[in-house]
Image: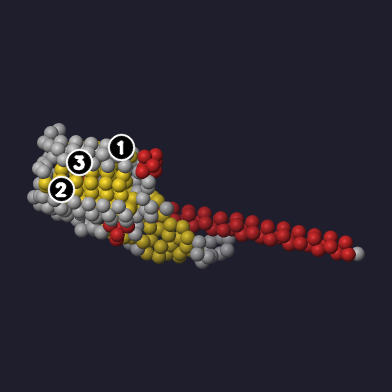
Amino acid sequence: MIPLLLLLLVCSGMALSLVRIVTQETEYMRETIRLRQLETIVQSFMRTALRQEDRTGITETVYQTEPLFPGKEPVNIRVAVHRDHSVGLRFLQVTAEDSRKNEFALRQCRVDFPETLIQSVLRNSFALAGGAEQGGPEEEDGSVTSTSDGAVFPQFSAEEIAVWASTGFPTALELQRDGLSGWMYYSRDRVSLPKGLTVQGSGIFLFADDAVFADNSVFTDRIIVLADRNLNIGSNVRLEKALLLCQGKLTVGTGSFINGAVLARQPVNLGNQTVITVDREVLEPFHSIISY
């Protein structure tokens, strides 16, 4: 009789365990379905907002969807917009959250440079709010000498913008291997990129502290650099399509080449045989990827 009771207890325990496994598996499947629904909703809202931006603009708002299945739970949709008019930045974030606090969000950044900044740069590829030390860049192959005439420097703050930027700055290995993916990359600390680094892809660098692009570095595609403090471009560096906005002291080493435009607030130190050529494409609107 006792062995039979033990057998019954073992069997009932196994049955309960099986029920728990099935229940957990079912709940996991329900949770997965809910998360996928949140992703689909956010992607749809993001696409709609971007299509409507040029026609009606984007405003912050909150929506509530019809209850979703499984669970018949409503979902809140938040459309958040942040603008920094000094450099024409617009950040858009769409977030979906259900009653269980499951959340999914996507972000996108756009830069439409203000007319005052565009005119400052178009007067000359090298516009200074201060002045130039050691003369200006060489006059060859369409390059333009430095000037301080009419330069209007934008009043941006890296820390304020950083709330919407990427949370981690890529390592030198990641930059070399993966390149830039069309997003904004923020560093709160000093950045010193190593010598001989070659980086492909486009993106925006946002530096709250000093930044160094070491000798023989090459950036092959479009970059926008917003430097809150000092920016040091080493010798024999090539920036093939770059817009540099530097609020601190800008130093460019010997034999470096910058195709695009430079706007600096403080005096600039330019090395011998430095060449800065005009490329108005760096002032075209910049659209980032849609990022998590």
The amino acid marked with disc number 1 is Gly
Above/below status of 55 relative to 276:
below
Q: Position of residue 162 (x, y in %)?
A: 32, 57
Q: Quadrant of residue 42?
A: bottom left
- Sequence order check: which comes first, mark 2 or mark 3? 3
Query: Please, what secondary structure does the residue beneath circle 2 have?
Result: strand
The amino acid marked with disc number 2 is Val
Query: Please, what secondary structure does the residue beneath circle 1 have?
Result: loop
Residue under circle 2?
Answer: 268
> At 39% from the left edge and 43% from the top edge, which residue is drawn?
174
> At 40% from the left edge and 65% from the top edge, which residue is drawn?
62
Residue under circle 1?
Answer: 196
Query: Is 9 situated left or right of 215 in this image?
Result: right
- The quadrant of the image that shows the N terminus is bottom right
> At 27% from the left edge and 54% from the top edge, which residue is drawn?
209
Residue under circle 3?
Answer: 253
Using the image as rendered, state which of residue 218 and residue 285 is in the foreground. 218
Around disc 2, counting alpha carbons within 10 Å, would you say few (fewer than 14), some (14 to 19), or many (20 or more)?
many
The amino acid marked with disc number 3 is Gly
- Sequence order check: which comes first, mark 1 or mark 2? 1
Query: Is 261 situated left or right of 32 in this image?
Result: left
Above/below status of 143 relative to 208:
above
Query: Is 14 situated left or right of 208 in this image?
Result: right
Query: Please, what secondary structure does the residue beneath circle 3 have?
Result: loop
From where the camera sits, is residue 63 visible?
A: yes
Q: Position of residue 132 (x, y in %)?
A: 11, 47
Task: Count the labels in the image.
Answer: 3
From where the camera sits, is residue 142 visible?
A: no
- Sequence order check: which comes first, mark 3 or mark 1? 1
> At 37% from the left edge and 47% from the top edge, which residue is drawn?
170
Q: CA distance from mark 1 to mark 2?
A: 23 Å
